[in-house]
Amino acid sequence: MEKKSLKGYLYLLPALIIILVFTIYPLIKAVLMSFYEGYSIINGSFDAIGLGNYKELFSDKVFRKALTNTSIYVVFVVPCSILLSLLIAVLLNSKIRCKGMFQTLFFLPYVTSVIAIGIVWSWIFNSNYGLLNYVLSWFGIEAVPWLNSPDYALMALIIFSIWKSMAFDILIFLAGLQTISPDLYNAARVDATPKWRVFLKITVPGISPMIAYAFIMGMINAFKVYNEVFSLFKSSAGPANSAITVVYYIYDKFYNSADYGVASAAAVVLFVIILALTMIQRAVSDKKTA
Amino acid sequence: MNEKKIKSSLGTILKYVVLIVGALFTLLPFVWMISSSLKSATEIVRVPPSLFPEEIQVVNYAKAWAAAPFGRYLINTVIITVFTTIGVLITTVLSAFAFSRLNFPGKKLVFSLFLATLMIPGEMLIITNFITITKLKWIDTYQAMIVPWLSNVFYIYLLTQFFMQVPETLYLAAKVDKCSDFKYMIKIMVPMNKSPITTIAILNIIGSWNSFLWPLLVTNSDEMRVLSNGLIRFQTEAGSSYELIMAASCILVMPIIIIYLFLRKYVIEGVAQSGIKG
C-alpha cells in the first residue's frame, strides 16, 4: 500500500467544500436558529436562547394539523402502495410476455415531474369536468368536490401519492424477488406445495428486507411531501390548510412569514423524525444480513 | 387433468388482467394529459368527456408556448440541468477515486461523515441555504440553482463501490509505468466504469430537470424561472384553459420520458441500487 499523503484531499476538495457549505453548516445553523428567540437574519442578533420557538411550534394548530395529516397519509399510502406493488411485482416476476414493457411502464411515474403530473391529477380531480367524477357518476355518485372541500382534499392527495409511490415499490420488490434462489421454488414444485404456501413461506420471507425498506422509505417520504400539495392545490396547502404537510409548513413559515426561528424548529423536528426512522431502517437491515 | 389445464389457463388470464388494469391505472394520467392537450376549448369542458379528441388541436401547443415565456424557461432548465450534471460528474469521479485508490489521513472518518449526511433531509437545509444565497447576492442567478447541487453523496458512494472493484494490480502496474494518479483516473478508471457513470448522469439529469422547490426559492424574475416554476405560475394564470395547461405540462414531461425510454436500463439499475444498498 502506498504511504499516506494529503493528495487525497485535493481530489475530495470540490465535493467537500459543497458538503460543508451547503449541508453541514446549514444543519448546525438550523439547530442553532431553532433555539434563538427574536433572531434577525440581517445582523445575526437575537434576544435570548431558549425553547420559545419549539413552544410556539407545538402550540401552533397548523403544525399539529401537518403532523396529523402526515400520520393519516402514512396509514393509507404506505400499506396500500406496498400491497398493490407486491401483487404487481410477483406477477411481473412470473413467466409472462412483454415483461420489459410492463416494467418500463410501471416505473414511469418515478421519473416524471411531480409538478406536471400533479397538475394533470388536479384536472382529473376537477369537480365539474374531471374524469374521476365522471367515472363515479356511472355508479350514481354525485360530483365530489375533491380539491375544494377540506373533507376530501387529503383523500385526493392520498390517491395521487399511492399512484406515485407504487413505481419505486414495484422496482425494489422486483429487484428483491430476483435475489431469491430459483432452487427454493423448484424444490417447492417437486413437493407440489400449494401456491399460496409458496408465497407465504418463500416469497414473503425472501423479500421481507425490501418490504421493511419500502415501509420506512414510505414513512420518510411522507414527511417530505411538498410538490404534490403545491401542484394539486394551485400553490396552496388545500382549502383551509386541509392538506398541509411538514415541509409545506417549513416553507410557508420562513419564506412567506419570515419566521426563521419557528421554521428552523420545525426543520429540526423533521430531522429528528427522519434520523430515528433511518436508524430503525439500518438496524432492521443489519439484522437481516447478519 | 383437463380441469387442471382450465384452472391454470384461467390463472394466466387473471394474471394478465391484473397487470393490464395496473398498467392502465399507471398510464391513465399520461394518456389524459396528452388527450386533453389536443382538445379544443369547447371539447375540454364537455360532459361526458371524450377519451380522445374529436379534432386534434396541435395549435394548443403554440398557444401555450406564446402565452408564457416557455422558451426562456426551457433554456434555463437546460442550462441548469447540463451544468449541474457536468459538475456532479466531476466531483463524484474525483471523490470516488480518492476514496477507492488514494490513501490519506482521516479517510475513514471523512467517508463516514459523507455517508452520515445521507440521513439529513435536504428539505431542512433550505432555510439556511436560502440565507447563504441571499448573503452571496446570488438570488436570481444561475449559480444559485447550480452550485448547491454540485455534490451528491449517494452518487459518490455508488461510484466508490464500482471503483473498488477495479483490480488493485492495474493501479500498481500503472504506477510502475510512472503513470500519474490523475492520468490513471481519466484513462483507466473512467472508461472502465462507463455504465455506472452513465447511470449517475441520467439520474442527475432527471433530478435537476424536475427540481422545483429550490429554484422557486432563489428566483424572483420571470427570466430566471425554470419550466416547473413557470408551469405552476401558468396553472394559475391560464384559469380554466385546461387544454393549454395540459399542453404546457407535456412540454415539461416529454423530454424526460424520451430520455427514460431510451436509457431505462440505467435508470432502473441506478434506483434499484439505492434500494439494495439500504
Image: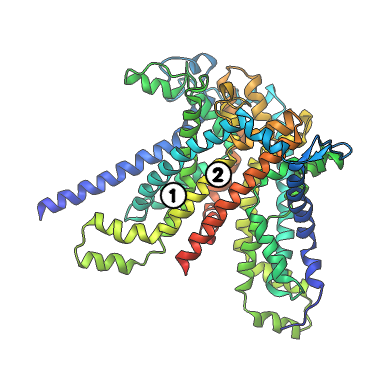
Instruction: Report the residue at 81% width, 34% height from top.
Output: A38
Instruction: State the residue position of label 2.
Output: A221
Quarter of the view holding residue B134: top right
Instruction: State the residue position of label 1.
Output: A170
> Of residues A269 and B56, which is closer to you in this image?
A269
Residue A178 vs B223, above or below: the answer is below
Give how far across and how far down residue B219 sits, in percent. Answer: 77, 34
Quarter of the view holding residue A253: top right
**Amino acid under label 2?**
Asn
Give how far across and how far down residue B267 sits, in percent. Answer: 55, 53
Residue A97 visible from this viewpoint: no
Give how far across and how far down residue A241 sits, in percent. Answer: 59, 25
> Considering only order in the chain, which callout, 1 or 2, is on the residue closer to the N terminus?
1
What secondary structure is found at the residue carrying circle 2?
helix
**Amino acid under label 1?**
Ile
Tell if the residue under mark 2 belongs to the same chain as the one under mark 1: yes
Give how far across and how far down residue B57 sits, in percent. Answer: 54, 22
Q: Is residue A282 left or right of residue A28?
A: left
